[in-house]
Image: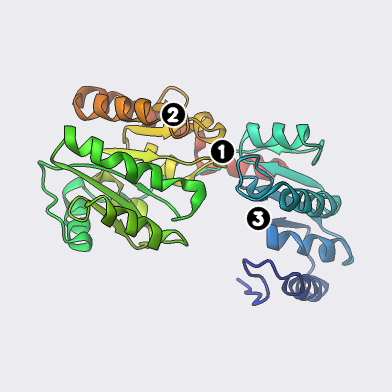
Amino acid sequence: TVIFPSLQRTFNPFTNVRFALALRAFLNQHPFDVVHFHSTNALFGAISAKFTRPSPKTVFTFHGLSFLHPRHHANIFTRLFYWIVFKKLLWFIDVPVFVTAADRDYAKRAYLTSRGVHISNGITTPHFLSCSDARVFLAAKTGAQIGDEQLIIGSIGRLAYPKNYEFFIQQFPTLLATQPNLVGIIIGDGPERTRYQLLINKLCLQKNFFLVSAIHDAARYLPAFDVFTLSSIYEGLSITLLEAMAAGLPIIASDVPGTCEALADAGLLYPINDSTLFFDAAVKLFSNPSLRATLGARAKERVSQFSLDRIVENYIRV
């Protein structure tokens, strides 16, 4: 592992240039056959990679479209700027890879690139804790009473606006009215944490809804959940979603392309921000343990299509 201090999540072009120069110096001393880039800031290194000798094959994976996504909250001029930046940088990429077919097709329609292959994300099955051990851990983290009689609906993800967790929090009082033993948990950190906590306080949910700071290997604790939910306004292909499927959890998720590609009929989908259909799906699962078990088993079977071994084979082929 080599750490480049100048490779950061940043909008500073000078930092990106420093990274590109540092990578070029490294590649001149340590030639590679292939260099694989995974983030917008890292993509600037593709320029320097192509100016080293011998020039390596370059691969870039779009783990979602970020600023290029039509639902991104940036204005049209910002999105146009990023479209131009990506368009130019992709000149230095031999193979663009998209984790969803929907992103690949949108990139073609948006004239970003006419090339590209679709290779899904993949996972190895996490070492899950037992339901009881996971609940004991979360009870200690939240200070909540979490026993066998509680129903937990939760999520794991970055507390940032694309995840749309305010929608989940806003629906919780209605769900709680029908299911008094309900507990809501989101595991993660991010820029929206303060705003989400204020919303929880405003709705008087402090005893029922909890934000748990990011935990290393958080997927281990998924068996504590009865239902997993993902309320995103857009997604690439969520690793956490795949992990929830591997845990055999019933899933309620917003109907966005990456999520519906992963889930198909192994979960319940609702249109983005549709309170009524989200509520109906949640109540259907809360009141029907047999349906929860059926959907959980179906999700666990489907996630085998996203095994890491299969994804590795596809990348080796590239």
Q: Position of residue 183 (x, y in %)?
A: 21, 46
The answer to which quarter of the image holds residue 176 is top left
How far apart marks 1 and 2 lie (CA) works out to 14 Å
Residue topped by disc 3: 38
Residue topped by disc 1: 310
Which is nearer the eye, 244 or 108? 108
Please count the marks in the image. 3
The residue that appears at 75% across and 50% down in the rendered structure is: 77
Closest to the camera, between mark 3 and mark 1, is 3
Q: Quadrant of the C terminus?
A: top right
Callout 2, which amino acid?
Answer: Arg
Secondary structure, mark 3, is: loop
Asked if residue 124 shows in the view, the reply is no
Closest to the camera, between mark 1 and mark 2, is 2
Q: Position of residue 317 (x, y in %)?
A: 71, 41
Say if mark 2 contacts mark 3, CB within 8 Å. Answer: no
Q: Callout 2: 10 Å neighbours few (<14), some, many (20+)?
A: some
Q: Callout 3: 10 Å neighbours few (<14), some, many (20+)?
A: few
Q: Earlier in the sequence, mark 2 or mark 3?
A: 3
Secondary structure, mark 1, is: helix
Q: Earlier in the sequence, mark 1 or mark 2?
A: 2
Which is nearer the eye, 138 or 284? 284
Q: Which mark is residue 302?
A: 2
The residue that appears at 78% across and 70% down in the rendered structure is: 20
Which is nearer the eye, 208 or 60? 208
Residue 35 lies left or right of residue 194; in this view the side is right
Callout 3, which amino acid?
Answer: His
Q: Position of residue 238 (x, y in %)?
A: 50, 43
The answer to which quarter of the image holds residue 223 is top left
Callout 1, which amino acid?
Answer: Arg
Q: Earlier in the sequence, mark 3 or mark 1?
A: 3
